[in-house]
Amino acid sequence: MSGRWIAGLNQAGMVVAFAVGIGLSSLVPSYADDPPLADVARQDTLIVGSWAENAWKDPTLYNPFAIGSSLVTGQGSVWEGLAYWNAFKDETIFWQASGYEYNDDFTQLTIHLRPEVKWSDGQPFTAQDVVFTMQSLIDLNGKVRFSKDLANITKSVEATDDHTVVIKMKAPAPRYFFNFFTWKWNAGAFPIVPKHIFEGQDFATFTNYDLQKKWPITTGPFNVVASNAQQKIFDTRDDWWASVSGLNHPLAFKREVFLAAGTDQTVRSQMVVNGDIDITVLAPAAAISVIQQTPDVTFHSGRKPPYGYEDTYTQQLFVPTQTAPFNSADLRWAISYYLDRKQIVSVAWMDTTTPAPVPYPDFAGLKKYTDSIPDLLGKYNTNEYNPAKGDERMKAAGYTKNADGMWADASGKQLKLQIAGWDEWDATGEIVVEQLRRAGIEATYSDPPDAADQLARAQYTSVIADGAQGAFRDPYEALVPFTCARTDPSGVRVVGGNKTQWCNADFDALVDQMALIDPSNEAALMPLYRKAMEIWLPDLPSIPTFEWMHNIAMVTKYWDCWPTVDGKLGEYVNEQPRILGFGLVLHNLCRAGSN
Amino acid sequence: METVKYLVRRFAFLVLVVFAAGTLNFFLPRLTGQDPIRSRLLDEMKNGASFASGISDLVKVYDEKFGLDLPLWHQYLNYLGDMSRLDLGQSFTSYPRTVAQLIGDALPWTVGLLTVTTLVSFALGSLLGALVGWPKSPAWIRAIAPPVFTLAAIPYYLLGLAMLWLFAFELHWLPGSGGYRIGTIPSHTWKFAFDVLQHSVLPALSIILSSVGFWALSMRSMMVGITSQDYVAMAEAKGLTNRTILVRYGLRNVMLPQITALALELGYVVSGTILVEVVFTYPGIGLLLFNSIKLADFPVIQGIVFTLIVSLAVATLILDLALPFLDPRIRRRA
């Protein structure tokens, strides 16, 4: 009896052991066979902490155009741009290119390349690479990233010599170079790929990853030496063209570790405090906490508020302006007057941001336009908290307060506002709801998973709280998303579209004129901008709320020369590791304590 | 013949369970109404895109690639076909990586962690519960029981957070996140194995501390019941030693339900412990599932849940087949 029992137990044990053994032995991670790495000391390593869970994150994909590829999860460090852009000074920093010029009517663009640029395998970077990359994208026309945008506007591209590219456009396009070749945020610009590697490959499926061949071949300062779902490791090259030519000093570090897997705020904060990572994004509360815990951390504004820098993603309340009751400008203005933005900023954001008067950020290039209309913003004060004025506008919109003190229309139907937002808006949403309820509007807030999708398709029926992206340096970019041409009830257009479906022919005519004007021609743009805002402000198609900030913690234990307001080099770029301009941070970093 | 019928019946039941659960697995994520491709592309664009009219075309290309442009019933048929071939498809968010590759990368971490923690907590808990429930155990055994039982009432992720704060943040004794040190590449070396071991201590401890009490509680209650049985009184009357009575008359009779529970628990090993893995950013199946749900990566969600369904169904089948060997009474009834 005892023997049989033990035999039974043995059998069960064997089954379990077998299953476990099979599981463990056959499922060793597939990246365990990557070539071994040389050890690099912590003080020679830059560790970049990712800030969120990202899509498009296959670690073995280094083709920027492939389906599933993303430049924000480390590839942005590996590739280089023709030029970079500093939002704080509205300054273009030429890199692979030495300059460009347009013809008089902006239908032709000539780009001059630096002759000293070389690929990491020693091959020269030439105009043929630019032509090959662009022509391949144009031919693919929508099948891979960036290709549709390029095909829509480009008539031809040719190399007139090894270092000169001439692009002809289908229509005047004074923003062509800025849109496609100036690296900023994650905004439409793409890298040039090596013709001798990509020729004959399928842009949609080619991975461009083979460590034995030292792929990816780029002009950037790194060799990719390891890449898995947790981290991407890039070792600095001694033969990087920019340091060889003297354009840039050799990188201060020997290795960059780009942590691809996100972790939560608490752990990330502690990693900052411990100096385990050198740069990452933190929420305002975490930013304040790490400053209290360690002297070895700084932020864009130094160790004092607002900590972060303004992002392009200015937060607004979007409403469907073609649908009742939101087709009433009075109602939209009433909502605006009922919002106490100072309270929102103070309570939900711990005073780490500021109210936004207009639907775009106040980067250097844009601020001068906003500053040029103080009289308009005084008359139509979008940041004014004034419940009495709100009440007047509600009455003008045909509402009266019922016995419960809530606004109701002529039929007695109480006004209901369902506000949908996203996770970062949750605390703010509750405050907005309370402010509106106190004003007599029955408001609710939720965070549905498809809010961004609804907004992008302009297919929503109440209020969506979110940002608008795309405005960097001239008012055309800020205003074009409100034009009739960008409305599309079918929801086909998803980014840069008219989210409120607001449509005004006079406004459109002004923006159409702006499209043809060089962004640097302030004298021509300023009057058009003013006229456009004279139409936009009274109608208030979207309700600006507050500026969106990026709070990036930069650890000063090992590295310095971060792009901070009070730093050695000033604010030379925005330091978000996910954006394309992060390359400038890599170029400029210096060792802590160095001069 | 009876045995064959029993096996066929059991196997048919397994297929039915897998089919029903697999069908739910397909439809449930889609009830959220999300458009995963469009949402992910939009999400990426939130960093600022001044010029992205081509995204719509890209959404179409992606949708075609993943079969999302097909009617739901067609997608379901494709899904059933893929699952029957054990083809878990390709991830939406890590394309072109396949779901099998993603699971393959994450599974060893989870299986390694949970197999060890489950077996250790089962062994420790069962032993402790048996001794606490046995009337002639030393007093010190009874003294350590209450704190252990208390730990069982605390969710393991809360224990994890507390240990994270104490051992990683305050004392700096152990690493608090990841499966291995930043900048290290997985390799078949002792150095890497030690690194992994160090990183698994806190997640493992949080699971073991909260699970030991669970196993001990169930073992103790069964052991208490056994002590009043006639055959135990008979064994005592025969003058058998305390150890013999405990092992041969006590433990042997209460082990059956414990092993049943263990087998089911081992079936869950592949699912991971989501919250522990999230708290410690441990690169296992739980973290993969958590991120996939957040990003609406349907194929990965389906792949992980399907793997869990199959592993649980197989564990149950193995248990059904193994129990008659463990308990002759079951064999006779079958």
Image (cartoon, coloured by chain):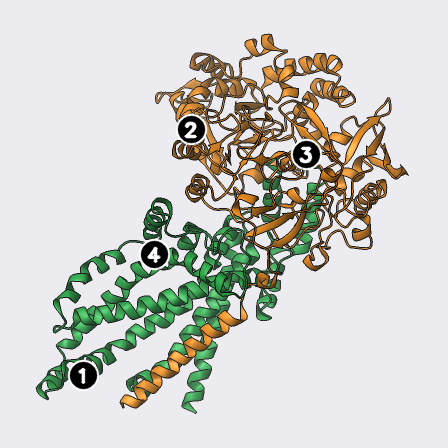
> Type of residue at label 4?
Ser
| The hue in which chain A appears in the rendered picture of the protein | orange
Residue behind mark 1 = B244
Q: Mark 4: give few (<14), some (14-19) or many (20+) Cα within 10 Å.
A: many
The answer for how far apart the CA atoms under marks 2 and 4 are is: 34 Å
| Disc 3 chain ID | A
Q: Residue furthest right?
A: A160
Callout 1 amino acid: Thr
Q: Which residue: 43% across, 61% down?
A: B197
Q: Which chain is green?
A: B
Q: Which residue is mark 4?
A: B206
Measured along the vertical axis of the image, is residue A524 above or below residue A548? above
Where does label 3 land, which residue?
Answer: A488
Q: Quadrant of residue B54?
A: top right
**Depicted B103 relative to depicted A270: above or below:** below
Query: What is the chain letter for disc 2?
Result: A
Where is residue B177? Give x, y as percent. 44, 51
Check disc 4 and report its element: helix, strand or loop: helix
Secondary structure, mark 2, is helix
Asked if residue B132 lies left or right of residue B181, the reply is left
Secondary-structure class at tag 1: helix
Q: Chain of mark 4?
A: B
- The chain identifier of the residue carrying mark 1 reads B
Estimate how packed mark 2 is, as few (under 14), some (14 to 19) or many (20 or more) residues with alpha carbons within 10 Å.
Answer: some
The answer to whether marks 2 and 3 sit on the same chain is: yes
Give residue A205's position: percent from left, percent from top.
72, 55
Is disc 4 on the same chain as disc 2? no
Q: Amino acid type of disc 2?
A: Ala
Q: CA distance from mark 1 to mark 4?
A: 34 Å
Q: Amino acid at mark 3?
A: Asp
Q: How far apart are labels 1 and 3 at the CA level?
A: 82 Å
Image quarter of the C terminus of chain A: top right
